Image: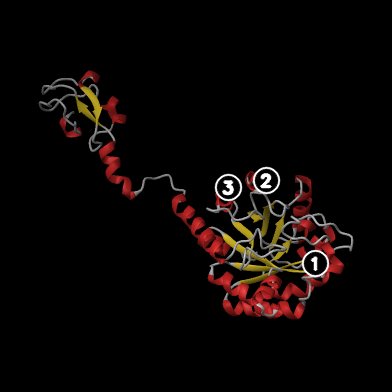
Amino acid sequence: MIHIFKEILDKQGYYLLAEIGVNYYDIAKNLDIDLMEAAKLMCREAKKAGIDAVKFQTYKAGSLASKNSPAYWDRTEEPTGSQYELFKKFDSFGEKEYKELYHYCKQIDITFSSTPFDFESADYLDPFMDFYKISSSDITNHPFIIHMAKKGKPILLSTGASNREEIERAVRIIRQYNQEELVLLHCVLEYPTVHEHATLNRIVSLKQEYPAYIIGYSDHTKPDFDYEILKTAYNLGAQVIEKHFTLDKTLKGNDHYHAMDAKDAGKIKEGLDYINIIRGDYGLSFLETERKARECARRSIVTTRLIDKGSIITADDLTFKRPGNGIGPEHINELVGKTALKDIPEDYIIDWKDII
């Protein structure tokens, strides 16, 4: 099996994926630079922020949407009225450009990927991809799922706007043709997703339903002040975190308004790293830093009165007091009925050598 995700998950506990998508078009326009320069700039900024992988979106408007396909996003943020019209503005890159981006990402040591939306792009992207992402919009596109599964690479399957049966069918089809790493991403296909609709407990449901697979979260909420949405997702079991990425969250259009920027990414990583620290390990043992408290705060068997040498010790002769450096209360039945080898004073932490 190809372990694209496991290696990083074993090292840091999470895999952070920056969905650049087609946001570099607006960045290029805003900074007055060309598209490739903008795309590379975003890759560099993602790398500097400690992000593990960048992901683009590869499509042609004509093969993705009919000309009368309606908008389903927040029109106050992205006013374009049809999907075809929107996608047409962002579909100029092809095999040559993605190949260049792939090599650039290798050069700066960040993983390149792009979500294909048609058979042609799935094929020409293949040499550049460590894994394939299947969009929520294609979870019922079984011929396309089969085509990508047959590539024999790890797969991320986004589950936005789907139900249990649709997820199960897609997983079953993938497994029919592909035994590589499979990541199931909880997702809400609502742009932006209001926080009350994040339904993060579905991460728990996916973990319960699919314990053999990696579970993740593809986020469309606007970044909150303390990044509680993503931190909660991670705490509930999402290990692969995908979020849209921009260099300017104030830009109008497409995916900037619910994206993270490099500063957000750094703080998200800080938050997830801190969660790892406070989670600790899974061992059921005490810490070395607890050793002193373990001894001082526990109780020992202590005498309630003077016990004369040769006397038989009774339960009334004994009680339990701190510190815990003597015989523990769990041994009380072993002491009762024993004989005192010497005069044992009151309020004395009794020792095995004092009795027979």
Where in the figure is residue 2, as x and y percent of width and height?
64, 66
How many numbered circles does the render carry? 3
x and y, in percent, of residue 29 in the image = 69, 74
Q: Amino acid at mark 1?
A: Phe
Q: Rounded to the nearest whole Å, what is the CA distance between mark 1 and mark 3?
A: 34 Å
Q: Earlier in the sequence, mark 2 or mark 3?
A: 2
Can you give x and y, in whole percent of width and height, for residue 350 in the image? 19, 31
Name the mark on residue 87: 1
Query: What distance separates the C-alpha of mark 2 from that of mark 1?
Result: 26 Å
Q: Image point 59% across, 80% down: which residue?
A: 107
| Residue type pointed to by label 2 | His
- Residue at the spot of label 3: 236
Residue density around tag 3, few if under 14, some if 14–19, many if 20 or more, within 10 Å: some
> Residue shown at 71%/79% (left/top)?
99
Q: Nearer the viewer, residue 262 or 316?
A: 262
Apparent side of residue 127 relative to residue 299 in the rendered image (left or right): right
Q: Looking at the image, is mark 1 or mark 3 earlier in the sequence?
A: 1
Task: List the residue tagged with mark 2.
Answer: 197
Dot 3: element: loop
